[in-house]
Image (cartoon, rainbow, N blue to C red):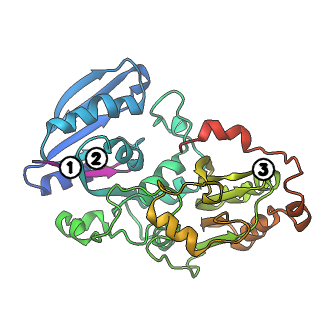
Amino acid sequence: MGVELVLVAGLTPHDVAEEIWRALPGAVLVRHDLRDLAGGVVRRWVDGELTVLELAHGCVSCTLRLDLLPLLERLSGRVVIDLDPALEPEAVCFALREIDVRIEAVVTVVDRANWLTDATGGDTLEERGLAAATDDDRTVAQVVVGQAEFADALVLTGPGDDAVLDAVLDRLNPRAPRTIRSGLDVTALLAAIPADARRGRFDDGFGTLLHGQPPLEPARGVSIVHFTERRPFHPARLHEAIDTLLDGVVRTRGRVWLASQPDAALWLESAGGGLSVGNLGPWLAAVEDWSDVPPDRRAMASATWHPQYGDRSQELVVITATASPEEITAALHGALVTDEELALADELEFVDPFAEWHDEMEGL
């Protein structure tokens, strides 16, 4: 019998994970505590039985590779994994690809009283005492936004009925069913997850950025900016414009085309005050052999192919909380190369602040 997983994420998910576990007869509850991970110590509970692990290398990937994956290979049936607050379910699901498991659902717990402040703030995990390692420089915003965005279902806890939070979640993860903690019906919540929900699956960064038909009209001051252009960014001007994506913005995700790196598709992602830039690999216009390219990507590229630029384009989706959509759009337009720069792009030597990030962030 294989393993079916329910992952529970959030800064304070423990009681929700236990309720989900109790509602699933025969399920096993697994919990890791990574607070002492920097010292090589991990505490793990399986159905309440504590095991203290000492790892030679105190890192999240080591914990997953050396403990969680072998543990799951020994188990069978349903398993509820109560993720440490510092863990993002997307990274865990990426590691789980190495073993034969089925992810039934990713459930994220959202604290209504604090989530929106966390999602637009600049606090680091280290400042909150939540860092998973000494070199963990992620922000709380990056974690809580990633946890909510990757979820198949959301459980809202804490007091309040925040219409602004609802408007943000409608745009961040429109397809995930939501329920209030006090009225949690685990069976009904899991049944409400759409049949084609993500359930731990990844895309390669070249798919659609507007998932689940989020509302495009503003509500409660919350808006979506969908920026698309068939012209490269000037790297230095884009670097300056990024400040507009870090204040009053919940989430930015998208593909970037730089005049200084014409063959590389870059991935830009921000949450609150945290920013990541990575390399998705080459644009198809720079690739001769498409035999290994996924069919969906080939179809999308062919449908929008430009006779000069191929599949190169800008596409960014920005969810604003208090930031001005008009200012963001204007800043991004201002960062594009001018007609004169575009005509001389092959001859100009652009100052590229993103070049030094390339190796550091590759494989994001």
Q: Position of residue 311 (x, y in %)?
A: 63, 65
User: On the picture, is 31 further left or further right than 273?
Assistant: left
- Within the magenta stretch, is there residue 8? yes
Marks 1 and 2 sit apart, C-alpha to C-alpha, by 6 Å
Q: Are marks 1 and 2 in contact (CB under 8 Å)?
A: yes
Q: Residues within 10 Å of mark 1 (few under 14, many from 20)?
A: some
Amino acid under label 2? His
Front residue of this view, candidates 305 and 206: 305
User: On the picture, is 91 further left or further right than 205?
Assistant: left
Q: Residues within 10 Å of mark 2 (few under 14, many from 20)?
A: some
Looking at the rendered structure, which numbered label has been put on residue 260? 3
Marks 1 and 3 sit apart, C-alpha to C-alpha, by 51 Å
Disc 1 versus disc 3: nearer the observer: 3
Marks 2 and 3 sit apart, C-alpha to C-alpha, by 47 Å
Looking at the rendered structure, which numbered label has been put on residue 14? 2
Front residue of this view, candidates 245 and 239: 239
Q: Position of residue 331 (x, y in %)?
A: 78, 65
Looking at the rendered structure, which numbered label has been put on residue 18? 1
Span highlighted in magenta in the image: 2-13
Query: Counting residues from the N terminus, which is met first, the one under dot 1 or under dot 3?
Result: 1
Secondary element under disc 1, as helix, strand or loop, is helix
Amino acid under label 1? Glu
Q: Are marks 2 and 3 in contact (CB under 8 Å)?
A: no
Q: Residue furthest bottom?
A: 217
